[in-house]
Image (spheres, coloured by chain):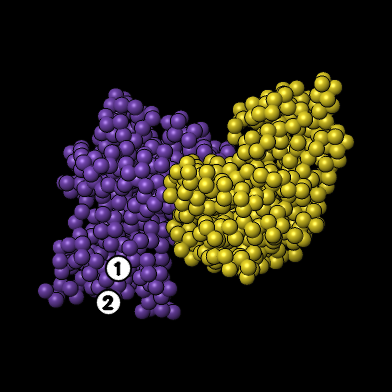
Chain colours: A yellow, B purple
Amino acid sequence: MTYLDAFLAAVQDAYDPEDNPAGHVVLAVAENKRSHEHFLEQMREASSSGGSGAAGSGPPPECMGYDDMRGIGRLRTALAALLRRTFLPVATEERLTISAGCGAIIENVAFLTCSPGDAVLIPAPFYPAFVNDLSVRAAVVPWAVAASEHNPGGRHVPTVRDLEEAAEAAEKAGHPVRVLLLTNPSNPLGVVWDADAMATMIKWCLRRGVHCVSDEIYALSIFDEAAASHFVSAAVLAEREDVRAEGDAENLVHVVWGLSKDFCGSGLRVGCLWSQNEALNTAMNNVSYFCAVGNYQQHVLAAALEAEEATDAFLAANRARLRQAAELVCAGLEEAHVPFVRPEAGMFVWVDLRGALRAQSAEGERALWQELLDSKKLLLTPGQDCRGSQPGWFRCCFAAVPEAAVREGVQRLGQFVKDEAKRF
Amino acid sequence: MTYLDAFLAAVQDAYDPEDNPAGHVVLAVAENKRSHEHFLEQMREASSSGGSGAAGSGPPPECMGYDDMRGIGRLRTALAALLRRTFLPVATEERLTISAGCGAIIENVAFLTCSPGDAVLIPAPFYPAFVNDLSVRAAVVPWAVAASEHNPGGRHVPTVRDLEEAAEAAEKAGHPVRVLLLTNPSNPLGVVWDADAMATMIKWCLRRGVHCVSDEIYALSIFDEAAASHFVSAAVLAEREDVRAEGDAENLVHVVWGLSKDFCGSGLRVGCLWSQNEALNTAMNNVSYFCAVGNYQQHVLAAALEAEEATDAFLAANRARLRQAAELVCAGLEEAHVPFVRPEAGMFVWVDLRGALRAQSAEGERALWQELLDSKKLLLTPGQDCRGSQPGWFRCCFAAVPEAAVREGVQRLGQFVKDEAKRF
């Protein structure tokens, strides 16, 4: 995070309509605190009533001992069932690896598929923490792919030519390309890439013999129904005839998912990898030792997820809450004539403040970010941190703070833009 | 593990006095299953009655969100209090980092203090998994230090000369020495090194500017009272005048500990680092992200450990059970005239089967190991896996299987040695 001190200070002085109306509004964290208590309640109930499968007994004694480092069988079974019911119909227990968060999964996949100095291509704008995930220990180079043409709706889908150019540039700089890391639904864009867009990119990977890692951590947070109907997991596309015809889909396509977003549980530290690549899964068995999830919590989670009806109801209710929160933000932005990419999934809106820039540059964007913070006590994620190609875009997260704070933040943003408009 | 297939097969065919009297006896796992249900019960009670500090409510909502990657404040506070009460009187919350197991802690310390190819000296014989912990991702070279003179009681304390010679050999081979990794109480020896022995090694580190990492994961499993009275943590020694006089003790001495052994919870995946080195602790804050413990489980553990009387009673009862288990094994070995190092701590005995070797070599040891497995269906940890300097020693773990199985294993070992003696 390029603004950690400002962030921590702002969090310490958080806005509250009653107690601190002049406080900071922090809309920079992609967490969902609209539904987290609901899933926690489901975990608590499972823990006390069915943690071991028997009433009232909690996690069983074997949770205290060594178990499968890729995750206990019970949780992998429960997760595979959930994934099959939802967006990953080909999920099986054997193909899942559970680790302490998706960051650990992505780091390990990078470590196992790349050598230090190799490049991982990532369509921009992207989740800022990928940089740390890939580089700090695995020493792999994240390489942004700029989408040359802005598709309808600000989707930033890279074309084959965009991918080719990025790969060429990375290799010219001495970084052989081993992986294309996609995020669908997109963070920070909040949009869903459709099957054609995804298939095109996967095919490019297969032709080139490059791994395609599809981070689908927001797959169950698609609150726009049209978007939900055209979302297709990379795991499903990897089964399609025309995709398989292009190369070794079985060994090169992998999906990342976890509980941080769709189950509002970033603090649970549970991520997982779906892969059919046996060599990769075997290697994950070793390195997962360093990031295994505690078996006590794994049993509690398994018991919670085994309550399938409750789980599905939770997911639907959560999406409804996200939809409502997104609509609130969109309405506020529209009212203030602030352009944005209409969100379909996740917990953020990609907001276009280019009109308020004093200078069309990274420095100009940073100055604007600082001004929003200083004059409006409003903290957004700067687009440059997501490697946005054009300065002046910001990510506005709408589910980590209470609705009143989101409302206040959007109101302050509208006021800021209005004041700016007057100034020129 | 050099014998994974044999191990898994043996576990599948485990001895049972009633159901499988001809089955395999596996005495190769350093787990404690004598007391694990007791601590689990304490966790369950805490989870249902005090997980959030309030009766009946379990872990609080904030467990669902991001928190300190070095461990939530509540658990660090509870652990610091426990450590202060027991063997680490200088422990404070700020100096603790919690990660998913001691393997993750050791890997991260190696990653942060070494460059790839640097050496970590480890007095032999040592815990076999250190090799994977250090080398698989951190690419650091574990370098065994052989104790040239066998101290009374088979303690294998390296002298300064042993350390010097090992360091010289490592550096000659192109591996600059950055760390000395000690394990006290020792795995696999089961003995406690006293303050003088430890201070000598720490001083050597300080004079050389090398980090001393003291793995004290068995510190609360010292069941021999005399040994318990002469155990002193490296953290305490780092405060001693004569030690501090030798170099930068504050920044170079670190202690590793966790719940896997002393709380019978290898499946909980909780390890921790105590360090006063601020740069190291800051860096741990970043890399701990990849191996953080789920906050739900952290809250449950904190609540369990906050029950201080129950915790202390658990630890005392666990030590009594270990003492009893150790005495059973020692009596059996003595009866069969099998020499061994008398254990003072942990859950294993270092057994001397040199007399049964056909060849005084690593191959001879492996052949003997295989013969024990084939003819007696008895599986021990081969000493060569612990880099024992003399072939023919084996680690016999006495707490991972039920007492009847341990009794049977020792009986089979005695029979084997008796048969061997007849053969010559």
Residue reaching furthest to the right = A335
Q: Amino acid at mark 2?
A: Ser
The mark that comes first in sequence, 2 or 1, is 2
Label 2 SS: helix
Residue reaching furthest to the top = A423
Q: Amino acid at mark 1?
A: Val
Q: What crowding class fits label 2: few (fewer than 14 Cα within 10 Å), some (14-19), or many (20 or more)?
A: few
Label 1 SS: helix
> Which chain hosts label 2?
B
Where residue A406 sits: x, y (%)? 79, 37
> Which chain hosts label 1?
B
Q: Residue at x 29, y 76 (%)?
A: B374
The quarter of the image holding the N terminus of chain B is bottom left
Q: Residue at x 31, y 54 (%)?
A: B188
In the rendered structure, the answer to whether residue A112 lies left or right of residue B409 reads right
- Which picture quadrant has residue B322? bottom left
Q: Circle 2 sits on which residue?
A: B375
Closest to the observer, B143 or A178:
A178
Q: Circle 1 sits on which residue?
A: B410
